[in-house]
Amino acid sequence: MAVPIPVAAFQLAGKRQAVVANTLYLNFTQTVYRSKFIIVLLWQLLLMVPMAVAQGQLYLDGDTPEQDCGLTLSGKVLDHDTREPLIGATIYIEELQRGTLSDEYGNYHFHHLCRGSYTLKVTYIGYVMERPTLRMTTSTVRNLTLHIDARQLNQVLITGERLTEEAQSTGTLSGRELETTRGLSLAESLQNLSGVSTMQTGPTISKPVIHGLHSNRILMLNNGVRHEGQQWGAEHAPEIDPFVASELKVVKGAAGVRYGADAIGGVVLVEPKALPDTAGVSGELNLLGSTNNRQGAVSATVEGKPASIPALSWRLQGTAKRAGNARTADYYMQNTGFQELNFSGALGYKKENYGAEVYYSQFNTKLGILKASHIGNLTDLENAIGRERPEQTSYDFTYTIDRPYQDVSHHLLKTKAYWDTGNAGRLEFVYGLQRNVRQEYDLHRASSADPELTLDITTHTTEAVWEHAPVGNFTGAMGINTIYQNNTYKGRYFIPFFRNFTAGAFVTEKWRKDRLQLEGGLRYDYKKLNITKRERNSDIIRPEYQFHNISGTLGALYDVGYHLTFGLSATSAWRAPGANELFSDGVHHGSASYERGNRDLNSEQAYNFEASVTYYGNQRLNGKLSVYNNFINDYIYLAPVQPPTLTIRGAFPTFEYKQADAIFRGIDLDLEYRFTPQLYLESRTSIVRARNLDLNDHLVGVPADRYNNMLRFDTDRLAGIGNTSDTYFALGGTYVAEQSRVPTVAEQDYMAPPAGYFLLNLEAGTTVHFGRQPVELGITGSNLLNTAYRDYLNRFRYFTDDMGRMLLFRVKLPLNFSGR
């Protein structure tokens, strides 16, 4: 029969192939069936069957239980550029759960619609999905246009493009590109996006840097809950298991309106996939192994939906990792192993107009700290900084983790409830409870098995958001949120006891018509910080700080056609100083440094301006260029201070918090060029320039220029192996320039920036089918030339090189326990 022909034809990516495939199919079916009526009917039934399976119950036009109000919606589905009709496109009204398909002339129609606002989901193989909204008061004719999807599945998606996202630049990691990062930390995964780099503390700890900003200026939302731990430290990596995520999204630049105070640098959204919506039990098993630190990891997920309770769904997930000493190009780094044990569970109840969800996760890790970073006296410290290789008593590999090390656990409990209020919109409430416990075991004075410092912070977060239904060309939301924190410590002093209360309210609106989108938003936040601290003279002080401010955003997107979209955005955000920036005074364990706070710090206020141009939907060249300028009033930074500090725990480089007006400027460039449908080049460039305006000098700790290029080849099957699919190969490299823009007037670092470096990388993978069981195989290689280098943003570059050659092997087994 005719089914295999359109299915094969529609796998072609380009516009011409899709049109030819449709034409061939129609000609063939006309020859076989000799009837236009039968052609259209079979074509609709063929495509509606899988859609019905995916969506649950789906009503065809004319077979609906909704009220007959007599209105009609009709029009054509067209190619955006050629205006050719698209045959067999799916048009789905989300509010009514009704769908239809365009006929051989591209026409579609719905009858018996009531007055109101509707969201259409328009899909067609080889084209980008569109979700236009419209408000019907009378019968309406609406033509729908789709853009060619030149980017294939499983690629890094550049979001913020066209009129489907916000004007502010974002980047999304999903599909294959996310899979190739499995086994890496969250920050290491994100550095595949332009504008994102990592700040490392040795080979075991890393956190994301967006447009040169990090730590408290980057908000992280884990499954919709603002992640709160001891994340203020440069060596305090986020306690989030990347295996939980099906998508990682980065909002670049100030984003304080929607996500709250502190989002000066950007926002990282860790999004798990939705709970299952079809009956049955399924899951997946991931196995990983690394050559460098001999890491082994296993992660498993099982989820299901009982047929007897169709509104209920659930998921269980767990991950275990273990790694030993990491190796540079020439030697092992002593005491750099880590262990990790995580698990999570989710339970959801979803009805047509309301639902609820409960989620719990626990993250546990033990992190070894490079022994060569903890030094006993000033002379040895001076000799160690910049030494070609550290002095170590052993260069052997071991899984044993000795002092110094950190033991961290993070608990998250999330509850969510929502209610669809019909024509009024959607109301959602989220409550999150988090507890983060960090124990630090020092190298010196290890007289017992107890930690020398225990930090314990408990956080309660609430958020209520109402998204109103479309009103004319307007869509938007408003909401309120609160944060309450209590932090205690036991052992040596580093930061004080504190309680923090924050409350905020926001409103955002978007106006969209034809090719133009305008957006704006406003937010107010209030923060109260209560400190309890014992001074060196044993006096107890209880200072109280209060901060409040307004954040705002304005943005515009305009699709001029011819594959071009222009965007402009102006955003503001602010951040109050943290307890560590105000009152820290002691050894910062993980980074092997001594830090001093500043009790007179003011709030930071950022004003970020961005312009972007996106070239999309072209069969060969696609990309995005964004230029930003982020002015930060009273920017808080950690400045090197000479000389180092000698304590009873050893000698440490010293840093203290200072404040100055600063400006961050930069360029992000993403390009893709296709030589053939299978062979293409991906290129990403990130450039940041930052200055201390008070000193008229450069700032310390700003990322160097970064260039990443990968030549990729995608094919369906490996040559000569018929049971393989989704095969890909990629070879390329990352070049990081020497950071020549460092402070020269004052605040000079303990060591000059290291030289630039180039790392050769590869990716390869395929899916092997053993009957009905697919097995996904992959390998990721980094630093294949085993280059010896030091990265400027690695806090341990004073003492050691970065990691050498690493091959990471992956096996993924999708599982189906329902027998389908």
Image (cartoon, rainbow, N blue to C red):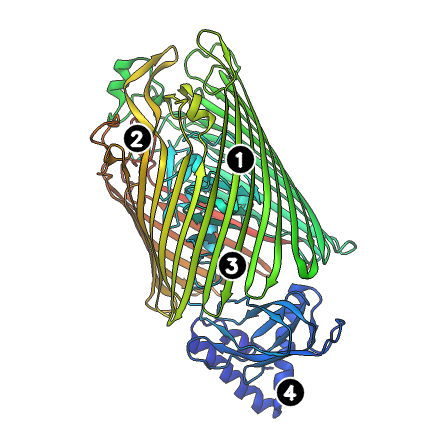
The single residue placed furthest to the right in the displayed view is 308
Mark nearer the N terminus (4 vs 1):
4
Q: Secondary structure at mark 3?
A: strand
Q: Which mark is residue 510?
A: 3
Q: Which mark is residue 526?
A: 1
Left or right of 347 in this view: 660: left
Q: Nearer the viewer, mark 1 or mark 2?
A: 1
Question: Which amino acid does the dot numbered 2 rest on?
Answer: Arg
| Disc 1 and disc 3 in contact, CB within 8 angstroms | no
- 223 over 63 or under it: above or below: above
Mark nearer the N terminus (2 vs 3):
3
Question: Which amino acid does the dot numbered 3 rest on?
Answer: Lys
User: In this orientation, which residue lies closer to the viewer: 732 or 478?
Assistant: 478
- 709 over 371 or under it: above or below: below
Q: Report the residue marked by disc 2.
A: 797
Q: Tell me the quadrant of the picture where the C terminus can be found.
A: bottom right
* Residue 474 rendering spot, x and y as whole percentages: 55, 62
**Residue appearing at x 20%, y 29% in the figure:** 745
Q: Which mark is residue 38?
A: 4
Q: What distance separates the C-alpha of mark 3 from that of mark 4?
A: 44 Å
| Disc 2 and disc 3 in contact, CB within 8 angstroms | no
Q: Secondary structure at mark 2?
A: loop
